[in-house]
Amino acid sequence: MALTFRGGIHPDDRKDATKKKPIENLAPPETVVIPMSMHIGAPCIPTVSVGDTVKIGTVIGDSSAPLSAPIHASVSGT
């Protein structure tokens, strides 16, 4: 049986300014800067060069250090 409690917490969601507005698709910015050091681990080395075309999700930085994580492109572009 799941544990539950009565009432709970219901903070103000502060959505009055936007709840009746439609969702919009935004164009990507002209320039995106993605740091190669995004965590406590070792910084990554870029795996792409200036001028390369990448798609969303492409690995753009990696490291062979024990405590590291690859960096992926969050937008498509050159």
Image: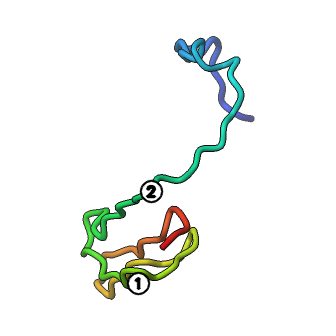
Q: Is residue 8 left or right of residue 68?
A: right
Residue that badge 1 annotates = 48
Q: Tell me, what colour scheme is on the image?
A: rainbow
- Res. 9 visible in picture: no
Please say if 26 is above or below 20: below
Q: Judge whether 7 appears above or below 60 on screen.
A: above
Residue with the most extreme right position = 1
**Measuring 70% from the left and 17% from the top, which residue is drawn there?**
20
- Quick one: label 1, few (<14), some, or many (20+) residues within 10 Å? few
Tell me: 60 left or right of 63: right
Could you say which quadrant of the image residue 71 lies in? Answer: bottom left
Q: Position of residue 50 (x, y in %)?
A: 36, 80
Q: Nearer the viewer, residue 69 or 17?
A: 17
Identify the residue shown where x is 52% and y is 69%: 77
* 22 or 61, nearer to the observer: 22
**Image side of residue 52 versus residue 43, left or right:** right
The answer to whether 8 is drawn above or below residue 28 in the figure is: above
Spatial CA distance of label 2 from label 1 is 18 Å
**Number of marks:** 2
CB-based contact (under 8 Å), mark 2 and mark 1: no
Q: Say what secondary structure mark 2 lies in.
A: loop
> Quarter-wise, where is residue 33 in the image?
bottom left
Q: Amino acid at mark 1?
A: Val
Q: Position of residue 53 (x, y in %)?
A: 51, 79
Give the residue number, with chain letter if any, for mark 2: 30
Instruction: Point out residue 66 in the picture as x, y percentages from the top left corner.
Output: 30, 82
Three-letter code, disc 2: Glu
Q: Residue at x 53, y 63 (%)?
A: 75
Dot 1: element: loop
Q: Of circles 2 and 1, which is in front?
A: 2
Q: Residue at x 30, y 70 (%)?
A: 36
